[in-house]
Amino acid sequence: MKRLIVSLMVVAGALLSACTEEEEFRQTAGLAGTYDVALVSYPKEGDEAGPDLLFVTSTDNNELRVLSLEASEEARGFIRAPNPLQPLAIPVLPRPQALTRDVRYDASGNEQTGRLVFARSSGSTQISVVSAERDVLREVRRLETTRLTGGASVGPVTAFAARAPEVQGGSTTLFFSTQETTGARLWSAVLPARDVLIAEQGQPEEARSKVEAAELTVLPLTNLAVNSLLVMPEPADVPSHPGVLAVATRGATGTVYKVDLRPVGGSAQPLNFGAQVLQLATHGRVSYEEVRQISADTRRTDTEDVEAGRYVYGILDPSNCGVPAQCTGVLAVDTRTGRVAKDASGRDALGNINRELNDMLPLSAGSGLPTGLSVASQRNLTIQSGEPADRLNPDATVTTTRRRSLTLPLLGIVPLSNGAILFFDAVNMLHLNVDAVWATGQTPNTATSTITLTNAQGVALSGREYVAFEGKFGVTRDQTYVLTYQGLLPGMVAVAREKGTNAFKVPYVPRAGKGPVPQPGDSITLLSAETGGQACATDVTVLDVQPPVAPATLATLVPSGALPAACAGYPYFQVRAGGPKPMVLSSGSEDYLARLGAGDEFSSTASYFFHPPGYAGETEGTLARIRVLGGVNLANELIRGDRYVVTTDAHFYPYLISVQLAGDLFFFRLPGPVVQATVGAGDTAIDYAYIAYPSANGILQVDQTNLTAGVANSFGLLPFL
């Protein structure tokens, strides 16, 4: 009996162990309020080598959680607490909503992260300092800024950044801004060394090393607020430099400044974004190769160097802009000049990229507003089949082109409020256009169109190619235009007749800015009802149009003869185009654009919405030019209702992906901040984006080498909840 009991206990223990292992594998972190993420990078080799750590807020729990980015995807997950059935929770200040980490740039211009993470909350005067050492993942100090400033500040913290120590065991410098009644104030505080912070954790405040904040007065901030702070690379020729910051301010005169914090010789250089900025990002030093055409049959491969911090990228603020469409998306400023960065759309006489010509355009995509921004160097991104081939091929003997390489010198990622995720070329300051493909017979780098003739029932008709289209690559958008023979005129589809009179009153200018519409020669068709009624079989031709006399807006149509006896009592009528301009032009967005006849054309212009290769600096270009060939008797060739459908192709689509909202990804609808990380080392390393999703209370891992642009993705996406 005793042996039986022991056997049962062994079996039960084995089952419990198996269930525990399975449960641990499926264990979630229980995130609640994933509003921000911060990445702490570890060396890939050496004594400190280890997987990077991703910190994420769990706001509703007043905690941070830590995702360990193990090289093995099976081992990757949230770090466990001492009880392995639970994820590690790091208690911090109430309602943590924003994170940052200490960072610096070494002598080679490479970004190096320290071992501290900082958390703040909206409306709070506190800052939590968290150790990012793998064996000391806890809050080691909670700073009260009113105490740090000796009572000089009583307002909440609105932005922060931290400069990592230059040597191991050194001190981190914390920068933060507070909002006071008179405006913002900018502060710096040198923290004790990390080992000291860890050792003093848990001690009474009076027993800890004293921390004091000094106000940074090089940048006046009266009547301004600070949106974002960013640690920048420091001049290599200035020993013991106290730091350089980029500061985004908001207010009547708000702009972005590059602030040199030297006590003597310090300065605040304006960075002219042309709009106020919500979030800032910069980059480490990058080098890449570019093939240049030296002569008709000679090429040379040059190495291009971009020093660390040359560009500052910012999310533009459309809420404080006169023309919101011009203040939406991401823009970059060249810190050497303080002006908007130049993009790579310009070309010299031999077709080489000339980066001195054209200011970049804000990079955006549709109606989505940016919710985060990350710029990282030497990142891989799946090449799409429709991307342009705009680099010279060094292996060819004639002038040919090749597609971009898998690795981008600088890759920008922007999650958007509409659920999409935008990727862009952050060194060339251009969209990655995944629709730059042209069929045989089409001219590359042009906007094209397809023109078909159908009858009123939509049946295609052959021949009679009497309509032509022209557009401009970079201006023309995807659109559908319809040119209808004897089409209905706008505002004249079912008009009530005036009782007791044969007068026909119609709008003279039914669409603002389009000019007078009704003309002699148009056709009046009487209707028995406003909708669903019978149309009179006999039309009445308009003999004359009597324009309205202000303030009236209705014109009077004078019929050419008596009304058909069978329809004279019909209470409604419609008007169709006739006479010398029987074609009515409309589009997918407007029901009326113009009236055309043989030899006429409609033309409109617009601003460039992206810069195509070879862009020469024009402000505007032809959006659409639709022309009806001259010398054609349209009445002999077409019947009422025949229409030319002009479908334009912009050959432009930015590198956008969305999330397949199904299964574990169902709630990943609204993305937030994003960071980029290379997981693993050597040939097995993979580049990922990690995006916080408040809508899902989770983090989405995006495999940048396993994406398909323009569609909802599920492969390559892994949620951590």
Image (tube, helix red, strand yellow):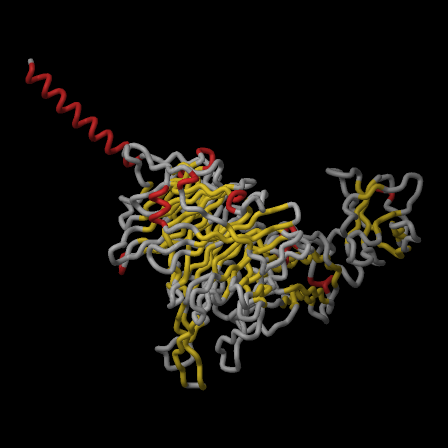
34 horizontally vs 551: left or right: left
Pick the residue in front: 697 or 353.
697
* Residue 328 point in image, percent of width and height: 59, 55
**19 versus 367 height, above or below:** above
Residue at horizontal 42%, vertical 74%? 304
Residue at horizontal 49%, vertical 64%? 436
Pick the residue in front: 467 or 83.
83
* Residue 47 point in image, percent of width and height: 24, 55
Instruction: Please identify the quadrant where the C terminus is shown.
Output: top left
* Residue 635 point in image, percent of width and height: 74, 61
* Residue 506 point in image, percent of width and height: 84, 49
Residue at horizontal 72%, vertical 57%? 593
Pick the residue in front: 58 or 371.
58
Quarter of the figure with residue 334: bottom right
Outermost residue on the front side: it is 206
Instruction: Please identify the quadrant where the N terminus is shown.
Output: top left
Q: How many marks?
A: 0
Q: Is residue 383 visible in the rendered structure shown here?
A: yes
Q: Is residue 445 visible in the rendered structure shown here?
A: no
Pick the residue in front: 150 or 116.
150
**116 versus 665 height, above or below:** below
531 horizontally vs 677: left or right: right
